[in-house]
Image (cartoon, rainbow, N blue to C red):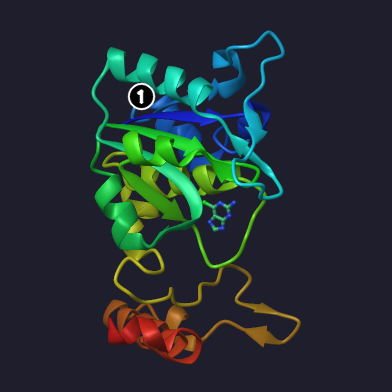
């Protein structure tokens, strides 16, 4: 998978992709992430990327030309499966959307800022608008990092059997069961006996019961889906 991220804050991406599973995917050649500074595509020598919105609304709007020029360049080099705009008014990201997108080859992710981006970018370039939840964050960058991480870990070959994504929370519409490691007792706090029993069938049964119990208690809506 190749992901091209368009942003006015490229420095925000030093970090999120350099550790853990995403780093592993990059090292294995299973994911390539390219960060593009929209400002590099600005027309003016002041490198402006935003302007006052028409209509007198307070707030700046990201202008068309720098984003369009960056998009046109990328699209001339390869085909993209989706051109995604990260925005709080997009479709809510969930595991099923991540699963679908993880099967794609080339993706563009555009990070918005200020009051928004000129609507014509959305009409003429964007094929999918994604929100990461019903709350507001200051820009699309952290949302793009979340989306990219959630897709990359699902690419076949990124996780080994032990890390398997199949037991992730949400993968089967259930939250994960509790987990424990040594010591078996700390401060009088004991690991459930069944986990020490060596009885594989009983352990799976306990894990499944706990996953259902936890989902019922915390996210009952997941069980109806
Ligand atoms: Cl994608 N962007 C912003 N700014 N806020 C959000 C979001 C995206 N998703 C949820 N809140």
Which residue shows up at 67% across the image and 50% down it? 138
123 w.r.t. 105: above or below: below
Q: Which residue is mark 1?
A: 29
Please state which of residues 212 and 13 is positioned toward the viewer in this rendering.
13
Please state the horizontal and vertical placement of residue 14, each as a whole percent of the image: 64, 29
Q: Quadrant of ligand 1?
A: bottom right
Question: Which residue is farthest top?
Answer: 45
Please state which of residues 158 and 129 is positioned toward the viewer in this rendering.
129
Question: Which residue is farthest right?
Answer: 187
Q: Is residue 35 visible?
A: no
Q: Residues within 10 Å of mark 1 (few under 14, many from 20)?
A: few
Q: Is residue 209 visible?
A: yes
Which residue shows up at 51% across the image and 64% down it? 133
Please state which of residues 218 and 35 is positioned toward the viewer in this rendering.
35
Please state which of residues 52 and 12 is positioned toward the viewer in this rendering.
52
Which quarter of the rendered picture does the N terminus lie within? top left
Please state the horizontal and vertical placement of residue 78, each as a whole percent of the image: 26, 18
Please state the horizontal and vertical placement of residue 79, each as a whole percent of the image: 23, 23
């Amino acid at each position: 998978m190749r992901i091209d991220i368009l942003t006015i804050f490229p420095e925000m991406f030093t970090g999120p992709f350099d550790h853990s599973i995403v780093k592993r995917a990059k090292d294995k050649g299973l994911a390539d992430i390219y960060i593009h500074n929209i400002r590099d595509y600005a027309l003016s020598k002041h490198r402006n990327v935003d302007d006052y919105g028409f209509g007198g609304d307070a707030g700046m709007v990201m202008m068309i030309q720098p984003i369009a020029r960056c998009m046109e360049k990328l699209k001339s080099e390869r085909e993209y499966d989706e051109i995604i705009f990260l925005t709080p008014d997009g479709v809510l990201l969930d595991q099923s959307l991540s699963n679908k997108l993880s099967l794609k080859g080339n993706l563009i992710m555009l990070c918005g800022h200020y009051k928004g981006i000129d609507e014509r970018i959305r009409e003429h370039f964007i094929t999918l608008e994604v929100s990461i939840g019903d709350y507001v964050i200051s820009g699309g960058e952290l949302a793009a990092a979340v989306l990219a991480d959630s897709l990359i870990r699902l690419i076949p070959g990124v996780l080994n059997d032990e890390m398997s994504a199949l037991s992730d929370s949400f993968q089967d519409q259930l939250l994960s069961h509790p987990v424990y490691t040594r010591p078996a007792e700390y401060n009088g706090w004991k690991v459930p006996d069944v986990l020490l029993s060596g009885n594989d069938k009983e352990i799976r049964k306990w894990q499944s019961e706990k996953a259902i119990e936890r989902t019922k208690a915390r996210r009952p809506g997941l069980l109806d889906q």
